[in-house]
Image (tube, grey):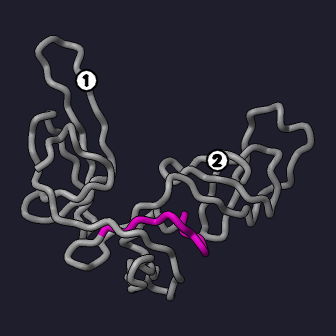
Amino acid sequence: MPKAAELKKGDVVEYKGAPHIIKHIDVKSPSSRGASTLYKIRMNHVKTRQKIDLSLKGDEVLAEVDFERRKMSYSYHDGEAFVFMDDEDYSQHLLSDEELADDRLYIVDNMEGIVGLLVEGGLIAVALPQSVTMIITETSPGIKGASASARTKPATFATGLVVQVPEYLEQGERIKINTEDGRFMSRA
């Protein structure tokens, strides 16, 4: 059973008898003597996607759920759900748009590096790679000489994702985007 100080994003833990996936951990170190470090944990219920915020001390324990991480690749979207294929046994697993939430905006054709989290043989969530390469489908024209400035403009992608990019980028260019915070990283 992991202590709060040992938890990582993507771990699946049991809380109030149900499995929850950890989405974010914020560490708060107090300035006064004798106070213990607090771990503010945001997690979602695996099935209902209900958000729960907890504040735990570093030595408090949460029960770990038995889950399996499997390498997967994105196959297609059937209109209601995203279909992922297990890279080892080629079995297919479905996740709905609601289950993926904002992660669905980063999922593109031929995407690799996806890790599926399976509980009792069923896919409950996917962990995306840290960055994804996407093609700009719509943005205002590039401005010559704008490379020296730090100004940005919105760029739209085929998935509906909108990211602020430098002014010199144009429609049709491939760029890398950080999937954690949705920021432009570099040209691809």
Instruction: State the residue lying farthest toward the right.
Output: 144
Residue 71, percent from left and from top: 42, 69
Q: Which residues are magenta?
A: 105-117
In space, the residues marked 1 and 2 are separated at their CA atoms by 30 Å
Residue sitting at 56 percent across and 50 percent down? 178
Q: Residues within 10 Å of mark 1 (few under 14, many from 20)?
A: few
Is 13 magenta? The answer is no
Left or right of 12, for residue 72 = right
- Amino acid type shown at disc 1: Ser
Badge 1 or badge 2: first in the primary sequence: 1
- Amino acid type shown at disc 2: Phe
Image quadrant occupied by the C terminus = bottom right
Q: Which disc number belongs to residue 134?
A: none
Q: Is residue 63 above or below residue 94?
A: above
Residue 68, percent from left and from top: 27, 67
Q: Is residue 46 above or below residue 165?
A: below
Left or right of 182, for residue 114 = left
Q: Residues within 10 Å of mark 2 (few under 14, many from 20)?
A: some
Residue bearing mark 1: 29
User: Could you tell me which secondary element the residue under label 1 belongs to?
Assistant: loop
Quadrant in which residue 111 is drawn: bottom right
Is 110 magenta? The answer is yes
Residue 50, percent from left and from top: 25, 63
Residue sitting at 31 percent across and 37 percent down? 26
Residue 141, percent from left and from top: 86, 54
Q: Is residue 3 above or below residue 121?
A: above
Instruction: State the residue lying farthest toward the bottom.
Output: 78
**Marks 1,2: beta carbons within 8 A:** no
Residue bearing mark 2: 184
Residue sitting at 21 percent across and 60 percent down? 20
> Residue 181 or 67: which is nearer the viewer?
67
